[in-house]
Amino acid sequence: GGWSSGSPLGPGAGAASWGGRAGSYPALSSSLRTPQSSPGLYGPAEVKISKSCTTSWPPSLLPPGVFEKNREQLIRKTCEAVILGTLHPRTSISIVLQVISDAGALLACCLNAACMGLMDAGLPMKSLFCGVTCALDSTGAITLDPTAKQEKEARAVLTFAISSMERQVLMCTSKGTCSVEELQQCIAAAQRASGAIFQFYRDSVRRKYSKT
Amino acid sequence: MTDFIIHFLFSGSITTADGSALVKLGNTTVICGIKAEFAEPPAESNNKGYIVPNVDLPPLCSSRFRPGPPGEEAQAASQFIADVIENSEIIMKEDLCIAHGKLAWVLYCDFICLDYDGNILDACTFALLAALKNVQLPKVTINEETGLAEVDLKQTNPLNIRKHPVATSFAVFDDTILIVDPTAEEEELATGTVTIVMDEEGRLCSVHKPGGSGLTAAKLQDCITRAITRHKEVKKLIDKVIKSIKPK
């Protein structure tokens, strides 16, 4: 233990619920949507096998398949990159993400929720990160934070995890094909949008501590 | 970035499979076998077939894998190959349809790693491409009276490969150094990995960076440039091997 969380889950745990939209950038279209996912964070706790970070994704109806395992790995490796694992040797940090509703851009939402959960738990991190989804339609126009319908109709959907340090790309996954220029444009758009998300983090944390 | 080690490619090594390929990237060895079977097309798109990849990392290839259900790395690799197939449209699933709503081919692509020395994703992608080029599907006609499928093994057609996706993996060290085609030791010490899949038109089929230390957009661009060069080299090798196989 040793850090306070101020959440109903009690000491040694952090919880945050993320419902928000990405910032809108003048030249690109953006959409208003509130996907929700709520992370619970437990750790560092004792484990038999020393793994630095495990994520679990409570399945709704079907048992976790290869697709879910892949998504878990993406989130886990992003968190591993920012958590200072050497501070907690032979311990495991368990991040449990529960999807409340899915209206598109789910992976990005989970990344944001995971980061806020880590902040809430007070775990020291190298940098913050946020998730941004870009959808490219057939004309090459970029839509940030697409709805499920826009994602389905898009030619390509790219999800990035952007770090707060120099806006570096921590994680990138793509669906569909795009040209090299389009990728660079999406990265630039995602880096700009990340500014708005980090501001949201700051505001939430400020709001939380201004009450106490 | 270092140059990658020359690799070997053998096509058609498994005679019981409909298509196969053995790829050796440095020490990493992956064999891919493709079996074609019949199935009913999916309800929502009754003119499509299926391609089902499965990557197996057995304990024989490396001491890090234990016997039992597929571990996270094998599952992630399987998902990666499934994404590459879908994103790159290497084969149109419509080409696998035999009769609308009744019969379609399902291609089971099984990858078995025989020797794990890092860079499994690149090896699997090459093996997939070479094996698919090696596949010969027999001609199937539906008998009007009985409604059963009749297979003519003497008449075989190769698959229509539309795109040639090639994967290039990099190991990232501390945001600055990038090593192409990492070995297992380099992967273990690396702070992150990036895999870029490109097709021959210079389009990105997949950019796979599962976490790890951050990269600037400029560094990512360097990786893409290297991936383009690699694509040309690999395509030449695959074409040479396919030409050298005598037709059955």
Image (tube, coloured by chain):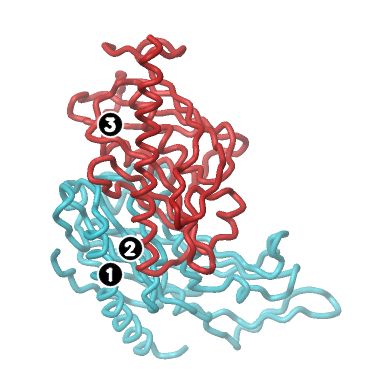
Chain colours: A red, B cyan
Secondary structure category for the residue under label 3: loop
Mark 2 highlights which residue?
B196
Please, what secondary structure does the residue beneath circle 1 have?
A: helix
Which quadrant is home to the C terminus of chain A?
Answer: top left
Question: What percent of the width, then of the height, locates residue A208?
Answer: 40, 18
Question: B213 above or below B114?
Answer: above
Pointer 3 residue: A52
The reply to whether dot 2 and dot 1 touch (C-beta < 8 Å) is yes
What's the amino acid at mark 3?
Ser
**Callout 2: 10 Å neighbours few (<14), some, many (20+)?**
many
> Quadrant of residue A150 in the image?
bottom right
How far across and how far down the image is residue B45, in percent?
69, 64
Amino acid type indicated by mark 1: Ala
Which residue bears the numbered disc 1? Answer: B227
CA separation in Å, label 1 and label 3: 32 Å
Disc 1 vs disc 3: which is toward the camera? Answer: 1
Q: Kindly identify the residue that appears in the image at 32 percent across and 65 percent down.
A: B123
Q: Which is nearer the eye, A20 or A7? A: A20
Task: From this view, report whether residue A13 is shown above or below residue B207.
Answer: above
Q: Same chain for marks 1 and 3?
A: no
Decide: few, some or many residues near mark 1? Use Cα within 10 Å; few <14, some 14-19, many ≥20.
Answer: many
Q: CA distance from mark 2 to mark 1?
A: 7 Å
Q: Chain of mark 2?
A: B
In the image, B184 versus B62, the foreground residue is B184
Residue B68 is labelled as none
- Callout 2 and callout 1 share a chain: yes
A138 or A100: nearer the viewer:
A138
Q: CA–CA distance between discs 2 and 3?
A: 27 Å
